[in-house]
Amino acid sequence: MSTATASSPSSSRTTLRNTVIRLAGNSQDGIQSIGGFLARLAGRTAQEVMTYMTIPSTISGGPSIFQVHLGSGEVLSAGDESDVLVAFYQHSYDDHLNSLRQGGICFYDSGEVTELKQERGIHHIGIPFTAATVEAIGGSAKDRGKNLFVLGMLCSVFHLDKEKLVGIISKQFGKKDESVLRNALLAFDAGFGYSVGDVEQFALAPGEATDDGHRISTDGNQMLTMGLLAGGVRYGAAYPITPWSSIMETLRSELPKFGGIYVQAEDELSAVCMTIGAAFAGHLAITGSAGPGLSLKMEALSYASMAELPLIVVNVQRGGPSTGLPTNVEQSDLMQAIYGSHGDCPRIVLAPKDVEDCFYIAFEACQLARKYSCPVIILSDQALSSRIEAFHEPDLDKYWLEPELDISPRGEDFKPYPLDKITRHAPPGSKIASGKYPIVTGLEHDEWGHPSGSPKMHTAMTAKRREKLVKLAEELPAPAIHGDQEGDVLLVGWGSTFGPIKESTDRLRAEGHKVGAIHIRHLHPLPGGVEAILKRFKHVAVVEMNDSGLYGYGQLAMLMRARYALPHIQSVCKTDGLAYRIREIVTAVEKILAA
Amino acid sequence: MSTATTAVSTTAAAPADKLTKKMLTADHPTWCPGCGDFAVLNIFYRVLEKLQYPQEKIVCVAGIGCSSRFPYFMNTHGIHFIHGRALPLATGVSLSRPDVHVFVFGGDGDGFSIGGNHLNHAARKNIKLTYVIMDNFVYGLTKNQTSPTTPVGRKSKTDPTGSIDRPINPMKQLLATGATFIGRTHAAQVKHMEAMFERAILHDGFSVVECLSECVMFYPGAFDDSTPRKGGNFETIDETQHDVTDDVAAFKLADNLAPGKFGVFYQVKRPTKNALEQKWIDDTQAKLGGASQKDILRKRFEAMR
Ligand SMILES: Cc1ncc(C[n+]2csc(CCOP(=O)(O)OP(=O)(O)O)c2C)c(N)n1
Ligand code: SF4
Ligand SMILES: [Mg+2]
């Protein structure tokens, strides 16, 4: 076996606190799975980890990347620049070389990549991934398994915990045919044993040992689903769409264990209506989709506001409008979530800030839907849906809501729509002492649910539906400020931009600017106390992944300007369908400061 | 419910009252005097009196339309939903509450037009419920537009020179959906209607009855050809001659519905989705050895370590 053609990088062995590895190939090469193994390994060794991937939306495959940010410090983003690039093809090399930092290392398949660019002190290390894999496994493997070869190679280069990694691989492939696991390990060992030359300076520092509970690593869609299950959701219906589908798939296969049912409906209209049916029947129920499907649910969502039924709706946002960029990230459904229906129909809108928070947001959505008897929309996004992070396992003794169906008899004075109280429906099966059974309705109604066209009643009932959410706003805690508590610029974000905004804040402060950041998890209603925070900074920059629109403001910026009427609220937007890089935010803020 | 899905909080039930028409009567119907829907309502009271389900276990569901106002006139648990989507809503109720009886009411526009695709899927899934389509061949609530059952040539506000689109054949349409009970009746034939409703309700599965119900306001005389006192002919299906389990025969029987025959066109036994889902739940839970719900979720987290 030939040794690698390495132009050897500088010698001394250093310990990296953070390493960003970008794997670039085609989707069928299994780079997602080895990226996932690395992320899981990081979770098990108490390292921080965040991943980022692109997947072509065509099923036949195509260029695809998986980026893993491993570190023993706090990992907030998937990383702007990579330290290591693994290029499986010439096109991977050509497209991703510029993501590599100065002096970074590029491992490439020397049987595929033939034209190299010697630039920015990048170290090139050519290894025949394909040929060496075939040699290790035998001709029948063709080039399958080269992903594991690469994993083995990275394991030795970074001195990763081989035993744990082999354990993870065995768990994954052990379920299949014996030969599958054997071949996987053969490829892994070949990569591990392959002499890559003098690059041994990359040993990844182990994370601090943790003893308070277990660490898990998974993606946002999984955590959202777990939050719903912990929050007592047992019924619902949906229609498949990327990047929402994995939530409904998990609910469909998990709920029977909990005695519940998840229905695949014929379309999103039916899905939301079935879910409202389960809510009317007295259960906490959930539907979900991506942007296009949320649009289809809008009529029924207005109904749920009017009829005051608890309901959870998840929207895993992707690039729009229309089919748009189905596998990219965007935050362009905020206005749709808050205002996208006919009539005045107040509802709650929440957004998780990272993968771990998907659990807690979903759990909170369950509490709020029950408490305020109205729809709650969770705005997740494509980036959160698929990226893997490691964090502590939620404590189910603290976060657990027993599903409850309350069909106890209701007293003489039972009214479904009391003007002075939050609606608490009496689901079918409840006896009503007065003998007058309630009707749940979408027509404007009086306190007993009888249709009423009275101008007074419509005004009073509109206020009833609005005021409960005004009350909620008062109960919500003001967001905590990260960084400076007052100063030059306040960064405001929502959703999956949490990490990049926080990291940008740290970088700007290191540059000497007085910068703070708040993250809005409760988007509608906005929590109290925000206005005072905004006023403590010279500039407010709302950072969003959506268009600045006809008036120059992104969706949250527009709302905040309307809500607080503060002219120093500005907008930082982008529409490239990719997660924010730190550099992009820092540059935008520097521009604001210079103006 | 055979599995303890949810904690049910209820105190001891009072001795069962006998269910009477008086108890079942709610708001006075807002229908035009003479509307066929009155008779449907009256017969429904009568059938429920006969079946004696506990009042609190009866659920009436409807979309939007004159006929869809039905739940307001029933003193039972009810929900007046949105146009065309009563069936998905009722599906959610039926699947999540095996302890209640679900009845759905609506018009021809609600069921065959805006809600047409939901009908296909609720029927093929064989959701346990009973659905009465009050077919008046017109849009009543919105005041006289063409409906999917309006005959060709009939003038309406949207077809001022007469309808040009071929109407659907409700029986053939329903046969194609996979519904397991399909009946056809007439609001002016109360005895027949009563028998149809009762059989539909007692059917274990998705049962649907098309009930011709005259809109005296916008389409008076629509059903004279099947109303004997108006010189028409009300012909019922002779079940000694028609095998109700034979869908090809039912299809043939539905060839001409002007005015056609009345009765049960089709009825077969097929497991409901309700039962199939419950079986999946039972099989799944049997493998879990009585683990608590919290522990089941904990196991999921363990797999993510
Ligand atoms: C989304 C929506 N589209 C349209 C309407 C208006 N609309 C209400 S009822 C109806 C048709 C009713 O006809 P049908 O279902 O046959 O009931 P009928 O009044 O004849 O009993 C229409 C078009 C509506 N309420 N909602
Ligand atoms: S408009 Fe027609 S269908 Fe509606 S209530 Fe009057 S008669 Fe009945
Ligand atoms: Mg009609």
Image: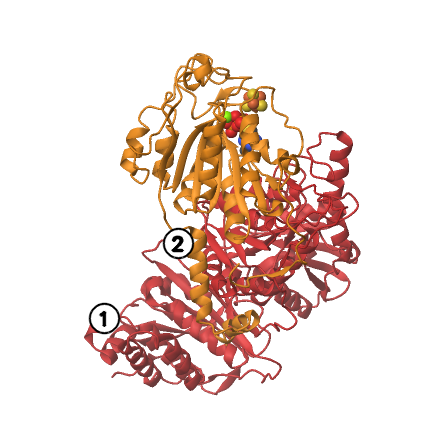
Q: Secondary structure at mark 1?
A: loop
Q: Secondary structure at mark 2?
A: loop
Q: Which chain is red?
A: A
Judged from the image, the quadrant occupied by ligand 1 is top right
Q: Which chain is orange?
A: B
The residue lying toward the viewer, choosing from A499 and A309, is A309
Q: Which residue is mark 2?
A: A57
Q: Is residue A567 visible?
A: no
Residue drawn where x is 76% and y is 30% of the image = A455
Q: Chain of mark 2?
A: A
Q: Which residue is mark 1?
A: A142
Relative placement, left or right, of A206 versus A506 is: left
The residue lying toward the viewer, choosing from B138 and A397, is B138
Residue drawn where x is 48% and y is 18% of the image = B158
Mark 1: amino acid:
Lys
The answer to whether residue A351 is above or below residue A387 is above
Residue drawn where x is 52% and y is 35% of the image = B105
Distance CA(mark 2)–CA(mark 1): 25 Å
Q: Position of residue A126 (x, y in %)?
A: 32, 75
Q: Position of residue B5 (x, y in %)?
A: 55, 62
Furthest-left residue in this view: A139
Q: Position of residue A273 (x, y in %)?
A: 53, 44
Mark 2: amino acid:
Ser
Relative placement, left or right, of A56 versus A447 is: left
